[in-house]
Image (cartoon, grey):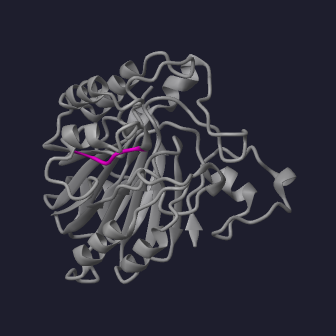
Amino acid sequence: MTDSYDSHDAARDRDAGRPDTEHGMTRRQLMRHAGWFGGAVVLTVAGGEVISHIADARDTHAGAGTGAGAGAAAAGSGTLRFVQVSDSHIGFQGPANTDVAGSFTEAINQVNSLGFRPDFVMHSGDLTHLSTAGQFDQVKQMMAAMKTDRVFTVPGEHDSIGDAGRTYRRTFGTGTLGDGWYSFDTHGVHFIALVNTLSLEKLGHLGNEQIDFVRKDVAGLPSDTPIVVFSHIPLFAMYPQWGWSTDDALKVIALLRRFSSVTCLNGHVHQLFTKTEGNITFHSATTTAYPLPKPGRAPAPTPQVVPARQLKDALGIRSVGYHQGDRELAVKDQRLA
């Protein structure tokens, strides 16, 4: 098991001796791996692994990829490049961010300034804050400004308030199954979009019908097919005390173990985190709205007020690319500032 590190390591020896997490990580390790919210993550698919680093604003126009290998992949004709945005929370009103529409617009501008046209954009949930029809219409119109061929979404728990996601599905659920799950293939990669924000008992939940969908969906795929899974809530136990986990995710993970390369991308936690277990790599995305505390640093995951400059520096997107020749997924984080 390997994990990507960032530069934030404020929890040091004072955390020594505290209990391990469910995945064998100490609280100290969890703290140092969970980055502050924000940052664009540029992922380039090319060989069964995920290569990631957090980039700054000067990388915005550099194109997809991380390092020389990913740069070469970005230049290839067989490259798939897509962008993940998450947790825009359109409709939020509070001191943590008094203009979430403005910060989401900056994220959209960054998507349009990456130096390449993404094949698609995925919004991994909490598009809105209160799941009103007006908020869904606003975020849909805003995302229409993205220079991309297609926009995909999965719902967050904030997109299901009061109506079990019906308004979300009326706006974004055309062609989906059940509560909004679906899959598709492109450039030799199989994508699965899951919904784990309904029937919540604190933790995320998939349910038997959706798990059966995944079982049938992947049954005929060769084991060397790269798999990318989208969900809002993490499919691993990042911090169950705050609901940052999915109670029946292991049933889906078991179905994906036979594949040589699996990448799971989620939102919800409003901060960057990467974790690898065998053939499966998990990436938690940042938000375009407001920061949440690092796990265990507060009584609850409530919006954090930070200086305006720090807020802007933290916002970002995730960009992903896949090169069929190299078959490797590369990840790159970029700040909006």
Looking at the image, is 97 positioned above or below residue 88?
Answer: above
Looking at the image, is 2 positioned above or below residue 34?
Answer: below
Residue at the image point whose x is 37% and y is 76% from the top: 256
In the rendering, at what x and y percent does residue 124 appear? Answer: 36, 46
Residue 154 within the magenta-colored segment of the rendering: yes
Asked if residue 116 can be seen in this view, the reply is no
Image quarter (top left, top right, bottom left or bottom right) of the C terminus:
top left
- Judged left or right of residue 10, residue 248 is left
Asked if residue 310 can be seen in this view, the reply is yes
In the rendering, at what x and y percent does residue 201 appear? Answer: 54, 54
Residue at the image point whose x is 79% and y is 64% from the top: 19
Locate residue 253: give its quadrant: bottom left
- Judged left or right of residue 50, residue 238 is right
In the image, 263 versus 134, the foreground residue is: 134
- Judged left or right of residue 48, residue 138 is left
Locate residue 252: give its quadrant: bottom left
Q: Which region is colored magenta?
A: 152-156
